[in-house]
Image (spheres, helix red, strand yellow):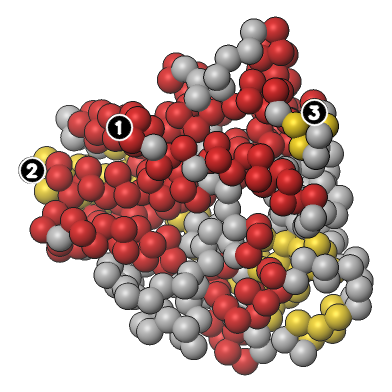
Amino acid sequence: MEKSALPDSFEEARITKGYGKMNDQDDPVTMVLGLKDVRKCAHNWKTFQSGAAPGRIVVPSEVNIRDTRQIPFEVDPPEHKDFRSLVEPWFKRPLEERYMASLTEQINALVDEVLTLDKVEVVEEFSLKLQSRALTLLLNIPYEESELWISWGTHVFRSEGNDLDGDKAKILYDYIDGKICMAMQNPGDDLYSMLLAATVDGKKLTREEIKGIIILTFSGGRDTVINAVTNSIAYFAEHPESLKRLAEEPEITGKAVEELIRYFSPLTHMGRVATEDTQVCEHAVKADTRISLCWASANRDAKVFESPNEVVLDRKLNPHVAFGFSHHNCLGATHARQIMNILLKTLADKVQSIDIIDYKENIEDLDQFKRKVGYDSINVTFNKK
């Protein structure tokens, strides 16, 4: 099997039952696996809510390490719409010419740097740097701030050997508290200041609401972007013809981004909490128990995707749910797409080939499923054109 391949560990259960089961810290989860069922449950916010106890819809659950509600991620309609309407224009800024130019400059500089090195550990030395530096644009704060975030490592809530690290999470919370205080004293044109000046339904946001939006901004697009970038680089290392094709057919870059995101599905799943006794896939689900919307499984559903376990760079129809679905689709999707789009264009322009030296896979343990989500480390050489 290719080093870059990401097998579909859900296929048998998806075909035979449509769901899977896992235990998460004694709070069991029914995993919804088919695309149609995932979309149906995601759309049904009255039965499957996001506004449960803060941290409970995340898998693994974060209830033991935070009590701040991430907004609008952990809020249901109609309140969700008000918060989403407030922040969505800010998160659409990556479409602006000035933003794209700055992001292109960042990515070009990083690719130029790694092309001078004999060996690059992609997760820490490339993907983490890329994600952290790009985040300064999203928050509209100085580039230098990214050095601190890089020092935190690839996860804001996890440390090596510990899926949920309360001490590490506190570092982020204390940091955000400090930045909110600074923005209160000296307002600027950053996200903190925008939120402090904003109102929802005629009311100023509370400090806790602002903190919840910022926590989501930091955590929601960190390891997901890192996984997408790292997996894509591994793929191009084993498929130099695809990199060559992107150079020759730049018009398919947008489709290639969507296909890589579909295939790698950087976030495996996201939970919801049932508000009543119900069923999914003819399986009984009790009130106040959790389901998960398994994006990674849905994106390999052969009922929807032809050759689902292959990367088809110019896939014509691609209704993937890697960025979620319905009202809770990923707020940072525009930013993530721009990162990937510019990265693919830059690699196609500057890189002849990529050699994998060694690697260690990152395998998620989901009880009956073991899913490769990316790499703990992967060392490569980037060869210049």
Q: Which residue is mark 3?
A: 204
Amino acid beneath label 1? Ala
Q: Is residue 232 left or right of residue 204?
A: left
Taking depth in this image into account, of 81 and 340 the one nearest to the observer is 81
User: Earlier along the polypeptide chain: callout 2 or callout 3?
Assistant: 3
Q: Which residue is mark 1?
A: 101
User: Earlier along the polypeptide chain: callout 1 or callout 2?
Assistant: 1
Q: Residue at x 11, y 58 (%)?
A: 248
Disc 3 crowd, CA 10 A, few/some/many (<14, 14-19, 20+): some
SS of the residue at dot 2? loop
How far across and how far down the image is residue 9, in percent? 53, 75
Amino acid beneath label 2? Lys
The disc at residue 385 is 2
How far across and how far down the image is residue 350, in percent? 15, 42
Disc 1 crowd, CA 10 A, few/some/many (<14, 14-19, 20+): few
Above/below status of 316 relative to 72? below
Marks 2 and 3 sit apart, C-alpha to C-alpha, by 53 Å
